[in-house]
Image: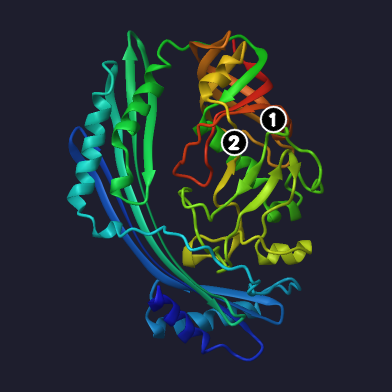
């Protein structure tokens, strides 16, 4: 980290009069392994390093990047960024981040996954495949068993006083299986997440995949009706991600959010508290610094059903007349900062998932959805998505259901939340899952 910060400081020394200069320097290494029938199907290791440079002068912005840490190449990139700024469109709100007094939280997010023996990683993927194949007699095939890890090191520095450095690592395994009974075949998946190999629970990933696939054997369509649905944690996390994208300050400024101009209003049931908290190390995507080098922080978006605000980077905050929420995101050194949530979750309740289901007379436990992102209109909030799962009758799980469609709006869904369970799942994505019961949803089937 100190090496990248020192490099950034050297580049900042070349700043010209009347210009703001920002440097993002990154090193990363990823490993991906897939095994099939006990053999290595693919193994890839990718290393990346480079620098992105942003120049702001006369209310114009220029950006350029180089996939190198060589100073001669970097100085050529700085010249290119300056040239690009001359062709920029003037914008009075342009400007780099400035220190706001929020101190970064110290997070223990790094393990040296690159030091782990590659053979140990391969063995872990093979062990996962073997465990999944033997998890249940009706498992007829393991479609894929994958291992992934990544280590990331970054520094952000600017002439406005930003100096930030961070190190993070992630690791996960995933498995996909097929289960068969008679003429019916169903698929299922399982995964485990952590920051290093020792964190990964292979047996749980295999058991989850087996359970998801076998429970849907014999699934059929159901008649159209309105009922209560229960989103399982993985499905709930997908909806939470979409809801959080509508609370993005950039989308609000563009008029592409159904929650614009609604701060202070009740937009959800009182049970709903939605928080983006990258400072919680249990989140797969936790980080102490955002894409502009600002300290990340816990941002409450919905509190007890009331909309409290939106996430912002420095640019959208200026345009909205507010302060940054430390929510700048960027795709490494090759892009300028955007806005987004990093680690969003709905506060869990005190009810177990079994008790939640026991309180429902007529419903559907949704275990998977298809085409959710393409089925949501981010402006109106309308959504319609394919779904499968298990019917709920008189408080108990009943027959499996597939090829149905569930539809509503994001706004109505939030208001119709009935109960939130306590079964939090930490997932390999920017949202955390928990089982959620939602009333009055249209299920369209046969």
- Residue drawn at the location 64% of the way across and 36% of the way down: 376
- Residue drawn at the location 38% of the way across and 22% of the way down: 211
- Residue behind mark 2: 239
Question: Which quarter of the rendering shows the N terminus?
Answer: bottom left
- For label 2, the crowd category at 10 Å Cα-Cα, with few meaning under 14, some 14 to 19 and many 20 or more, is some
Quadrant of the image occupied by residue 181: top left
Q: Is residue 375 left or right of residue 171?
A: right
Task: Specify the farthest residue to the front.
Answer: 350
Quadrant of the image occupied by residue 239: top right
Q: Which element carries disc 2, helix, strand or loop?
A: helix
User: Are the two marked residues, 1 and 2, in contact with CB atoms closer than 8 angstroms?
Assistant: yes
Q: Position of residue 147 (x, y in %)?
A: 30, 44
Residue 110, compared with residue 237, is above or below; it is: below
Q: Position of residue 359 (x, y in %)?
A: 61, 15
Question: Which quarter of the rendering shows the C terminus?
Answer: top right
Q: In front: 244, or 300?
A: 300
Q: In front: 83, or 389?
A: 389
Task: Specify the farthest residue to the bottom.
Answer: 17
- Distance from label 1 to label 2 (Cα)? 10 Å
Q: Position of residue 403 (x, y in %)?
A: 53, 18
> In the rendering, which numbered label is found on residue 94?
none
Residue 430, compared with residue 108, is above or below; it is: above
Quadrant of the image occupied by residue 161: bottom right
Mark 1 or mark 2: whose residue is earlier in sequence? 2
> In the rendering, which numbered label is found on residue 413?
1
């Amino acid at each position: 980290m100190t090496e990248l910060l020192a490099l950034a400081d050297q580049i900042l020394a070349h700043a010209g009069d009347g210009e703001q200069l920002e440097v993002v320097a990154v090193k990363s290494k990823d490993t991906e392994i897939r095994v099939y029938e006990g053999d290595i199907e693919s193994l890839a290791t990718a290393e990346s390093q480079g620098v992105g440079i942003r120049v702001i002068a006369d209310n114009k912005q220029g950006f350029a990047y180089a996939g190198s840490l060589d100073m001669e190449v970097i100085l050529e990139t700085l010249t290119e960024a300056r040239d690009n700024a001359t062709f920029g469109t003037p914008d009075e709100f342009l400007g780099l981040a400035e220190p706001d007094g929020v101190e970064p939280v110290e997070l223990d997010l790094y393990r040296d996954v690159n030091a782990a023996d590659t053979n140990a990683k391969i063995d872990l993927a093979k062990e996962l495949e073997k465990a999944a194949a033997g998890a249940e007699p009706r498992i007829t095939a393991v479609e894929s068993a994958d291992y992934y890890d990544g280590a990331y090191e970054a520094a952000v520095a600017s002439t406005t006083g930003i100096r930030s450095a961070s190190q993070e690592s992630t690791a996960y395994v995933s498995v996909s299986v097929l289960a068969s009974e008679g003429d019916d075949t169903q698929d299922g998946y399982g995964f485990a997440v952590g920051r290093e190999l020792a964190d990964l629970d292979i047996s749980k990933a295999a058991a989850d995949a087996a359970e998801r696939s076998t429970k849907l054997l014999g699934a059929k369509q159901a008649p159209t009706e309105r009922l209560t649905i229960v989103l399982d944690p993985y499905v709930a996390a997908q909806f939470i991600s979409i809801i959080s994208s509508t609370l993005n300050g950039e989308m609000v400024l563009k008029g592409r959010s159904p929650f614009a101009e609604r701060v202070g209003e009740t937009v959800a049931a009182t049970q709903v508290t939605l928080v983006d908290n990258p400072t919680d190390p249990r989140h797969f995507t936790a980080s102490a610094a955002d894409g502009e080098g600002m300290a990340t922080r816990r941002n409450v978006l919905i509190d007890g059903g009331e909309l409290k605000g939106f996430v912002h980077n420095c640019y959208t905050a200026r345009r909205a007349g507010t302060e940054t929420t430390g929510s700048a995101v960027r795709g490494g050194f090759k892009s300028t900062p955007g806005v987004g949530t990093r680690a969003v979750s709905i506060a869990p309740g005190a009810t177990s998932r079994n008790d939640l289901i026991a309180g429902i007379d007529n419903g559907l436990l949704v275990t998977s959805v298809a085409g959710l992102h393409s089925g949501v209109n981010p402006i109106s909030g309308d959504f319609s998505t394919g779904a499968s799962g298990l019917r709920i009758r008189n408080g108990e799980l009943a027959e499996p259901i597939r090829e149905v469609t569930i539809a509503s709006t994001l706004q109505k869904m939030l208001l119709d939340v009935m109960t939130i369970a306590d079964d939090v799942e930490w997932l390999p994505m920017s949202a955390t899952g928990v089982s959620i019961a939602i009333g009055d949803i249209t299920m369209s089937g046969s």
